[in-house]
Image (cartoon, grey):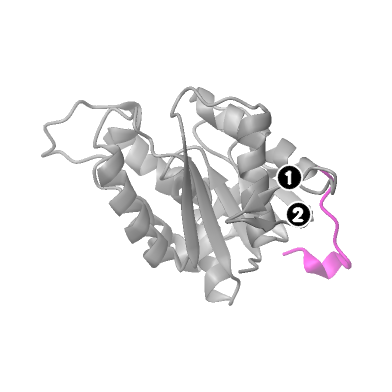
Amino acid sequence: MKLDILAFGAHPDDIELGCGGTLAKEAALGKKIGIVDLTRGELGTRGSAEIRDAEAAAASKILGIVARENLEFRDGFFVNDEKHQLEIIKMIRKYRPEIVLCNSIDDRHIDHGKGSKLVSDACFLSGLRRIETALDGVEQEAWRPKLVYHYIQWKNIEPDFVVDITEYMDKKLEAVMAYSSQFYDPNSKEPVSPIASKNFLDSITYRAQDLGRLIFKDYAEGFTVERYVAVNHLTDLI
């Protein structure tokens, strides 16, 4: 299945938090979108890998995702090496996306920066025909996405562009809260983690509001780029 957009996240819920509104918007516009989670988030303070598997499936339905896979890399310990790059390359060549979205280039959780560089490097390597891969016994053809963008996570990194998600903010929040084991619940008996605080839950909305404010919209999500953003006409900008 060829996809328009393939989003990678180090952990289940990274994508929903970073670019869930954008994906919901693109899906509503008819784009085919897939998600690849690098790990099952098994080192998370709350919940379990099995619970997060079910939560990820629920979030995908909310966003309109047509394919989701988990590579089951080791949470906290995966590295950017040939073995891991080849697994990413197989996903890129399988789905042949025009656009790849991946983790923030620098963030509080060490897996986010690692995952960002791993996916970015694999996007380049995937276009080299002398790197041979096979999936389910079938040889794959080289494929390089046209664009690689990085969504913003814990740190307030200055975005290179923002996407108006005003009409899809509710979908984003619904997809995030599909991960009920991970986020603020005053009745939970599990330990409180940084992302399980009331402040963090509120920040999902107020960060989107602040980015929206800067473009005279209600809500927006920010991204950083690896090369200049090009437009055909000045009127392409809103």
Taking depth in this image into account, of 217 and 179 the one nearest to the observer is 179
Residue holding disc 2: 145
Q: Which of the 4 image quarters holds residue 44? A: top left
Q: Seen in the image, is 221 located left or right of residue 172? A: right
What residue is at 28 percent from the left and 33 percent from the top? 197
- Give the image location of residue 131, x and y in percent: 79, 42
Which quarter of the figure has residue 30? bottom right
The vertical placement of 106 against 132, above or below, is above
Q: Which of the 4 image quarters holds residue 152?
A: top right
Q: Given the current orientation, which residue lies at the most extreme front position?
A: 137
Residue type at mark 2 is Pro
Q: Classify mark 2: residues with Cα within 10 Å, few (<14), some (14-19) or many (20+).
A: some
Q: Position of residue 115 (x, y in %)?
A: 58, 33
Residue 149 makes an appearance in the image? yes
Q: Position of residue 47 (x, y in %)?
A: 24, 37
Q: Quadrant of the C terminus?
A: bottom right
Q: Residue at x 52, y 50 (%)?
A: 36
> Are the residues flagged by discs 1 and 2 in contact, CB closer than 8 Å?
yes
Q: Residue at x 10, y 39 (%)?
A: 187
What distance separates the C-alpha of mark 1 from that of mark 2? 6 Å
Going by the image, does 130 lie left or right of 145? right
Q: Amino acid at mark 1?
A: Cys
Overall secondary structure of the magenta section: loop
Q: What residue is rendered at 70% in x and 47% in y?
A: 133
Closer to the camera in the image, 68 or 179: 68
Work out which residue is located at the far bottom of the displayed protein and give it: 30
Q: Quadrant of the N terminus?
A: bottom right
Q: Which residues are magenta?
A: 227-238
Q: Which residue is mark 1?
A: 123
Number of marks: 2
Q: Is residue 34 magenta?
A: no
**Is residue 230 a member of the stretch shown in magenta?**
yes
